[in-house]
Image: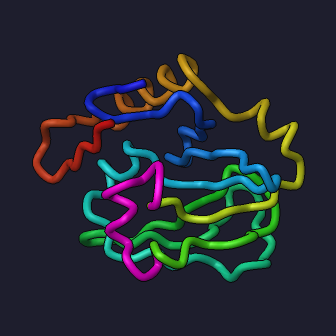
Amino acid sequence: MNLHGLAFPDDLLYAPEHNLWLREEADGCLTLGLTAYGCALYGQIFAFTPKRDGQRIEQNRSFGVVEFAKAASSARSPLSGILHSSNAEVVRRPALINQDCYGSGWLVRLIADDLALLKTQLLTGAAARQAFAERMTRDGFDPQAEGVQVLGD
């Protein structure tokens, strides 16, 4: 799916209020990453500092800090669980987040406390597209504005 020039792959789960995508992995972990909309809002990302592997992360609490042009923001988790691993390559080369947010630019992998419950709270497909469209309207998002980095398919 594509919205205002921003890609949102159909095979992912989304937490629009966190600007995150999630993907269930074969080992039961969930990979989390910043959406193209999050990248467009932040602009060029200069650093990602995750919490320690093995640390417990509570829902709506930080799993790391994303630093961009003139500010920093806590990356907040849509789920509770254990931080299984962080993307060491993104820590070394944070530009990967902007270059490939749905691929090599992923942020962390978590082991969810209750994956079945989580799946009922996350969005896919048309519901995700609608939620992001509403969020963009609330945010006054203008993909043509100076400094907005639009990442397509």
Location of residue 62 (image quadrant):
bottom right
Query: How many callouts does the rendering have?
Result: 0
Pinpoint residue 111: horizontal percent, then vertical percent.
80, 60
Pinpoint residue 65: horizontal percent, then vertical percent.
50, 73
Q: Residue at x 45, y 61 (%)?
A: 105
The residue closer to the viewer here, 46 or 89, is: 89
Q: Is residue 105 left or right of residue 123?
A: left
The residue closer to the viewer here, 57 or 105, is: 105
Q: Residue furthest front?
A: 26
Q: Is residue 10 left or right of residue 47?
A: right
Q: Is residue 153 left or right of residue 122?
A: left
Q: Residue furthest top?
A: 126
Residue 97 belongs to magenta span: yes
Q: What stretch is highlighted in magenta?
A: 91-104
Task: Using the image, determine if residue 24 lies above or below residue 128.
Answer: below
Pinpoint residue 124: horizontal percent, then vertical percent.
61, 27
The quadrant of the image that shows the N terminus is: top left
Location of residue 72 (image quadrant):
bottom left
Q: Which residue is drawn at 33% across and 58% down?
A: 98
Pinpoint residue 151: horizontal percent, then vertical percent.
28, 44
Task: Using the image, determine if residue 110 lies above or below residue 91.
Answer: above
Location of residue 21 (image quadrant):
top right
Residue 23 belongs to magenta span: no
Q: Residue at x 26, y 31 (%)?
A: 5
The quadrant of the image that shows the C terminus is: top left
Q: Residue at x 72, y 46 (%)?
A: 24
Task: Using the image, determine if residue 124 lies above or below residue 115.
Answer: above
**Colour theme:** rainbow
